[in-house]
């Protein structure tokens, strides 16, 4: 057996445990959930086969499509909020000095906090009576801007988008810093000689060199936004009047509050299909010639 074959066998053997766990706890439950979607089941007792009725009801429910629209707002806020902010910060903080490492750690800190804690903190910030935001607006002469940030259907989806952006900048910052640090110093020196500094350096050098990393970040943004649940559930619970309902909270409420496990399974499968379509569409839009 050649050295290459031995190395290949060693890699395969090393990957088998992780692959087995992934198949058992990720892939199999996906198909199992899709299977349950064909049944009317309350979690206990006998299951009644209903065919595609659950899936048809899902796509006909206006509340589901309202939740889908809200999810698109979160997706857009994540892509056009988290990625650009993380990219700009990575250009400023890519060096390895103590100060830059400290600031990177501070930006990453929200990822360490529990989502429930973040939701409670921002819930107090937005509180219409004792919230910090309205207090600041009142004392800087912007009393006309004061409102119930989580209770007003006109602004509450944009309000909940802010903590989602704030809490998830850190991973993309680390991702972009690692990518920028891998850009060849010869390329950087040649860019400086040609006068590519500031925004020109970002547009002509950094973005093309880390384009694949940006594509990965956008995929992570989409997939994370489509399954967003915890922050919204803590701050609003999907209300008022389902104005902040997301597809994940819609699925949760129908599964565990109404005890329609079959219908909830069909909703989760639909969410997965929509997420795959959005990811595939984003990759086609970002595809470029070598």
Image: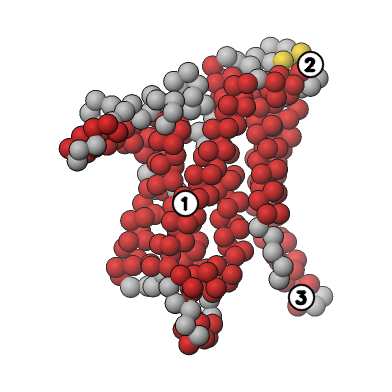
Residue at which label 2 appears: 50
Q: Residue at x 44, y 36 (%)?
A: 158
The local secondary structure at tag 3 comes to helix
Residue 68 vertical position relative to residue 25 in the rendered view, above or below? above
Query: What x and y, as percent, mark residue 271?
Result: 65, 34
The picture quadrant where one finds residue 5 is bottom right
Q: Residue at x 43, y 56 (%)?
A: 85
Query: What x and y, as percent, mark residue 81?
Result: 46, 50
CA–CA distance in space, label 3 to label 2 = 53 Å
Numbered disc in front, either 1 or 3? 1
Q: Is residue 190 toward the left or the right of residue 2 in the image?
A: left
> Which of the marked residues, 1 or 3, is nearer the chain's N terminus?
3
CA–CA distance in space, label 1 to label 3 = 42 Å
Numbered disc in front, either 1 or 2? 1
Residue at which label 3 appears: 4
The local secondary structure at tag 2 comes to loop
Closer-to-camera residue (1/27): 27
Split into 4 quadrants, where in the image is the N terminus? bottom right
Q: Disc 1, disc 3: CB below 8 Å?
A: no
> Which of the marked residues, 1 or 2, is nearer the chain's N terminus?
2
Q: Residue at x 37, y 72 (%)?
A: 96
Residue at which label 1 appears: 82
Query: What x and y, as percent, mark residue 30?
Result: 70, 36
> Which of the marked residues, 3 or 2, is nearer the chain's N terminus?
3
Q: Residue at x 46, y 70 (%)?
A: 199
Closer-to-camera residue (289/120): 289
């Amino acid at each position: 057996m050649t050295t290459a074959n031995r190395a290949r066998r060693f890699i395969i053997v090393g990957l088998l445990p992780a692959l087995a766990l992934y198949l058992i706890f990720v892939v199999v439950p996906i198909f199992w959930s899709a299977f349950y979607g064909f049944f009317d089941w309350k979690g206990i007792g006998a299951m009644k086969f209903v065919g595609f009725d659950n899936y048809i009801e899902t796509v006909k429910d206006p509340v589901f499509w309202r939740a889908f629209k809200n999810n698109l707002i979160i997706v857009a806020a994540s892509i056009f909020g988290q990625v650009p902010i993380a990219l700009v910060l990575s250009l400023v903080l890519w060096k390895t000095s103590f100060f830059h490492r400290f600031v990177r750690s501070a930006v990453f800190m929200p990822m360490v906090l529990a989502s429930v804690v973040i939701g409670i903190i921002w819930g107090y910030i937005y509180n219409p009576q004792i919230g910090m935001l309205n207090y600041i607006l009142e004392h800087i002469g912007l009393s006309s801007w004061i409102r119930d940030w989580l209770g007003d259907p006109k602004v509450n989806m944009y309000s909940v988008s802010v903590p989602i952006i704030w809490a998830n900048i850190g991973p993309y910052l680390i991702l972009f810093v690692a990518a920028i640090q891998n850009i060849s110093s010869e390329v950087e020196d040649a860019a400086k000689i040609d006068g590519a500094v500031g925004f020109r350096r970002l547009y002509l050098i950094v973005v093309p060199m880390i384009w694949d990393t940006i594509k990965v970040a956008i995929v992570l943004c989409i997939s994370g936004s489509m399954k967003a649940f915890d922050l919204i559930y803590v701050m609003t619970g999907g209300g008022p009047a389902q104005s902040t309902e997301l597809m994940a909270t819609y699925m949760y409420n129908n599964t565990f509050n109404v005890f329609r496990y079959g219908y909830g399974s069909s909703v989760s499968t639909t969410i997965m299909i929509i997420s795959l379509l959005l990811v595939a569409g984003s990759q086609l839009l970002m595809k470029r010639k070598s």
